[in-house]
Image (cartoon, rainbow, N blue to C red):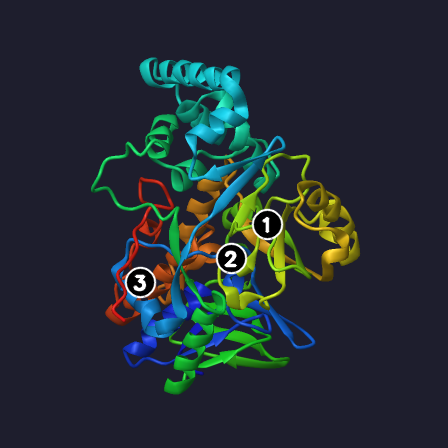
Amino acid sequence: MDGEILIIGAGPAGLACAMELARSGRRSEIVERDPAIGGLAKTLEFRQGDDLFRTDIGPHRFFSKNDYLYAFIEDLLHEEWRTVRRITRQYIDGKFYDYPVNAFQVFKNIGPFKAARMAFDYMVASLQYGVFGKEVVNFEEYVVSNFGRTLAEFSMINYTEKIWGIPASTIHPDWARQRISGLNLLSVLKNALFLAKKGTPKSLVDEFYYPQYGTGRIYAKIAERLQEVGSRIYTNSHPLKIRHNGSSLEEVELSLDGEVRSVKPSTVVESVPITHFLKLLDPAPPAEVTRAVEGLRWRSQVYLFLTLDKPQVTEDNWIYFPNKEIPFGRVSEMKNFSKDMSPPDKTSLFIEFFAFETEDVWSMSTDELVDLVVPYFEEYGFFQRADLIQAYSGKRRFVYPVYDMTYPQNLEVIKGYLDRFENLHYIGRPGRFKYTNQDHSLEMGIAASHSILRGARADLDSIGAEDEYFEKGRIYEKRI
């Protein structure tokens, strides 16, 4: 492994980097702490007798404005890559709401009084933040300025606080600028009433690409290609210590499936949590960097996967539950992504909880999680306890980088330090402490490979930083 390119983390970013390097004839060695590759985009399989259930770790739809990225995935999956009609709803105050917004449904559900209140609040916010120039300093003010107080509290502030576990007034507006930039009440209404301008990029709210056997197939295919060219992936493996001279990473001590080994890579690509990576450095970073690391926080997740003895629960790909009194935040029915994710006569639900590791849900057993959620699904008419075949649970740390009010300053200090290392590239959601979608992580990996091949650093911060709605993209015309 000496002199090779070492990639730490076999998630979307790390594997995309290795794949693109391989296309140019460069081998790499990849180490992954988990027993399986794919990171947050892996697909899990559960065998029950003759039945096989598959699930992603949450919903992973694919959309992008990058034709090169579409061709990258198409080359791997070919006919396994299929278009799926997107059906998404929110469950708010006891009623379901379509997404994209159905204006007539919303008006019927909320009634004329609340609709008028939303319109009035939006006009007030437009005056405060638009005409009189009130400054937007946090997430709460951002969504109020663009949607008005009533609508902001109806489905945005509550769900955001549910994800992050902190008040919306303490969340940095970068979160809104990254995820919903360009959206406001008027643009939502125009889209709902089919008044959006023609010729604008198609927003993938109604259709997306998805692999036949789960999004993890992308990374399984990459692993096959890497093996063919001599690159190796070590699972159950991770770095123990990374020695450096202040400007270059010189030696990495690794645990390779339990065996300790030291290597001297020419280049290191890291796509693991940036806060963890910095703690591996020897000598340790300066005190101000250590303080910045301690100032960054992550939000974790708990997962519950239920297999059900019924052919279908809903037609939705996923449903959001913004109300805080409901313990879970999002539910996906994987059969609605691809019929091959469940047996024909059965289905499954993947349920996500957002949590800090100090919260009760983090330490709950599978049975306790089942007892917690089943009454809600019985009430909503999804299924009865008698329909439940089996339940599986899991948890994952470092899922969401917390965009609190001090994160930009802390991250700037950390990046300033890491950028000193001429042979280091840090990428992906955990590697850059940036909430990115799967496609952006793949783009980062590809960009990092080009940086290595050309000897010039790419602007990774520009990936996923478009000043427009984060889910905007278009359907790519496949070549096959």
Closer to us: mark 1 or mark 2? Answer: 2
Q: Quadrant of the C terminus?
A: bottom left
Mark 1 and 2 residues: CB-CB less than 8 Å, in contact? no
Please tell me whether residue 347 is drawn above or below residue 381 in the rendered image: below
Closer to us: mark 3 or mark 2? Answer: 2
Give the mark nearest the N terminus, 3 or 2. Answer: 3
Q: Mark 1 is on which residue type? A: Val
* Separation (CA) of disc 1 from disc 2: 12 Å
Give the mark nearest the N terminus, 3 or 1. Answer: 3
Residue pointed to by mark 3: 69
Residue pointed to by mark 2: 336
Closer to us: mark 3 or mark 1? Answer: 1
Q: Nearer the viewer, residue 472 or 334?
A: 334
| Residue 122 position within the rendered picture, expressed as x and y whole percent measured from the top left | 42, 19
Residue pointed to by mark 1: 331
Q: What's the mark number on residue 459?
A: none
Q: Mark 3 is on which residue type? A: Leu
- Is disc 3 surrounded by few (<14), some (14 to 19) or many (20+) residues within 10 Å? some
- Is disc 2 surrounded by few (<14), some (14 to 19) or many (20+) residues within 10 Å? many
Instruction: Tell me the element at label 3.
Output: helix
* Separation (CA) of disc 3 from disc 2: 24 Å
Q: Nearer the viewer, residue 26 or 419?
A: 26
- Is disc 1 surrounded by few (<14), some (14 to 19) or many (20+) residues within 10 Å? many
* Separation (CA) of disc 3 from disc 1: 28 Å
| Residue 112 position within the rendered picture, expressed as x and y whole percent measured from the top left | 49, 17
